[in-house]
Amino acid sequence: MAVTTDTAASVDSVVRPRGLWGWLTTTDHKRIGILYGVTAIAFGVVGGTEALLIRLQLATPNGEILSADAYNQMFTMHGTTMVFLVVMPAAAAFTNYFLPILLGARDVAFPRLNALSYWVFVFGGLFLTLTFFLGGAPDGGWFGYAPLSTQVPEVVRMDYWALGLIVLGLASVLSSVNFITTVLTMRAPGMTLMRMPVFAWMATVVSFLLLFSLPMITVGLFQVFMDRNLGTTFYDAAMGGEPILWQHLFWLFGHPEVYVLILPAMGIVSEVLPTFSRKPLFGRSFVIFSGMAIGFMGFGVWAHHMFTAGLGPVAEAAFGLTTMFIAVPTGVKIFNWLGTIWGGSLRLNTAMLFSLGFIFLFVIGGLSGVTHSIVPSDAQQHDTYYVVAHFHYVLFGGAVFGIFSGVYYWWPKVTGRLLDERLGKWHFWLMFVGMNFTFGPMHVLGLNGMPRRTYRYPEGLGFDMWNMMATVGAFTIATAVLVFLANWWRTRTRGEIAGPDPWDGRTLEWSIPSPPPEHNFDIIPTVVAEDDFWHRKYVEDDSGNPVAREAPVESPVSTEPIHLPSPSYHPVLAAFGIFVTAIGAVYLPWGLLAVGTGAVITMWGLFGWSMESLTRREHE
Amino acid sequence: MSEHAVEAHSGGHDAGHARKVAMWVFLGSECLFFGTLIATFLLYRGRTGDGPAASDVFDIPFTSVSSFILLMSSLTMVLAHHAASRRDRRTMRIWLIATALLGTVFLAGQVFEFTEFVEHGLTVTTSPFASSFYLLTGLHGAHVAVGVLMLLVTAFMSFGGRYRDDEGMNVEIVGLYWHFVDIVWIVIFTVVYLLQV
């Protein structure tokens, strides 16, 4: 075992506030990771409730539960919430918590910037969710197509949407800059780029995707906001504006965003499968390079969302082809995972089950995705439930199952206790069955011609039974989530103590205690191999089988003092200022007062921020 | 946005280096931002509707002069950086403030130009051309304004005598941003003002 005692190194004694104030001012990447995770679960309950209302409305013909207006708000906010407030922050939770540890670092490159991006994200999410109480939530679809998003300027709903996404985008750009810098400058000695764990690689690719795709939608969102509030003519066809431009800008972001959602899950699965197959990841470099290929190609396929917009045969053929090509690196990964399982001695615990479920469901979603790349076929499927089925297989069956795999895998590291396996398996099977019941029938519904975004359908079109099945499935998923929450609650105090390395893990996070000390590593590890921690525990015999080392490699003991980032309230203050500014901007012109106030608060936060490090430096 | 913690955290890694990397990464993102704005402008530049076209309102000699002033600010920025690397803090401050002044003159020119255009009937609502012109040049102006603020803060923070070790690095990072904003202006000036098709 590596170093486990805290006495080996002396940590500087910065006073750390406890309780709520401690969480508000934390700059520890692990606590920020936990904040992201808890926030994602909370928003997941919101987004899930919206989904259940949608399914209740559609369970039977001529549904009476939601009005057309309420239904528009529900599906718009369900999409927006699940993408921006659930899956992205859930992935960010893992990245925040584990990226520095996987790299052998004490924290991210900019701890306070990290806190700022979390708080900006939270306020952006609140801003979007509060709209339910402020005259109605956004109702123009999560894709915000102009002129749906630009007309009726007297209703502020889509202003909330446009501004909320700008704020959330700011948070993502900040954290992407932070993560990329962390990866480029903070790796432990010997941790070459190709020795980085696959999850760290996927987090890096995701950061680049966000960095290069968010600016494009930000410009589009500015244009939507200005069209609505300043009377500009970007998307006003009567004045020569081009609504198709919005679609391009949206999907130039929106398609890379799909990979932003799925790549972290792929990274998690690439960590879980080797651990529970007791084999190294098969074709590791292929997994990494195919992830990079997906990242690059993700920018070249956006117009496949617009095949029915009338782009012309050349563009449609080109984008049809690139879309088929992007299935290649994705398929490469699938075969690598199968190769990893092949011949391994599998342990089918909950984390592993979720990873296997991920592979199964993601393949289905991937295959229906390929059918969309065939333009004539897409023309039939467009805007039907077939599309809904496809992207839920990818984003629920893929991203969410991958995330839950990570939850069960890393929970003992974060909390020090194992989640209950029996409840975990209930959780998995309920969710797996429920998911197939919900989204499987949607393929049929779509092929039968049921359109998306319709709030009500007449009897006798062949939709009734399938819709009822889907609704039953949705409630099964909700039950599975309740089982998970119960598991969390139950194991909080009664869960089995995990110890530092419960799974016989391969990567650096398992070499430190659970939960990790604030400074992560008593001494920064020196890395000599891929899966470095595994090689500290095992050698290979003549036939290549792992044999436990008699005496595990001990890390040297350091007495060097360790400095940790001080807590700071300036990030949360600056983020609050941005929130006030955004609220003011919705209610122009009199909101200008709030815009000014918010700007002052933000400047106050940023100024205090830069002064803070000055005063600390003086102490030294 | 100095990050003191990095230094201590990265086991001998250079905190300033991390901040420089971060600025480069951020500027990569900014390239896409301005690229998108320029693409929008290119799409819309002929769509003037009933409003004035570019040739009706632009005063190329005037904008050339203010562009020249902005480009000269890159020179003073280099001089500030040079002074900082010599640890000549007095000269450094002078050049930093000079850079900020040149940036302010450019901004004043932009404000003057915009009022002229509005008097000629080119407002944000006139046409897609006008909307995309004001969005592109307006957001560039906002970047210049942020840059001026950063320059002034850097200059005035050096008076306290603090930041001794980081000062050169701060100037270098602000310089990266400033040069980027200048380079983007060269592209904007060329595409928007000079290439009249």
Image (cartoon, grey):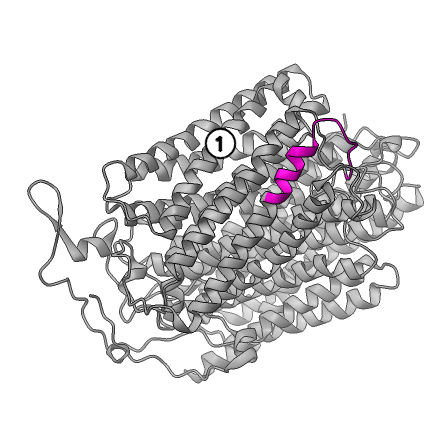
Task: Judge whether residue B19 is colored magenta.
Answer: no
Q: Is A418 left, or right, of A400 in this rendering?
A: left
Q: Is residue A320 above or below residue B122?
A: above
Viewer-proximal residue among A42 and A186: A42
Q: Is A313 left, or right, of A508 in this rendering?
A: right
Q: Is residue B101 above or below residue A544?
A: below
Picture coordinates of residue B16 (x, y %)?
44, 63
Q: Is A346 left, or right, of A40 in this rendering?
A: left
Look at the image and give the residue range highlighted in magenta.
A455-472
Describe the element under mark 1 as helix, strand or loop: helix
* Residue occupying the point 82% across, 36% down: B128
Q: Is residue A230 above or below residue A511?
A: above
Viewer-proximal residue among B115 and A460: A460
* Residue occupying the point 85% across, 42% down: A151
Residue at numbered disc 1: A364
Task: Judge whether residue A467 is colored magenta.
Answer: yes
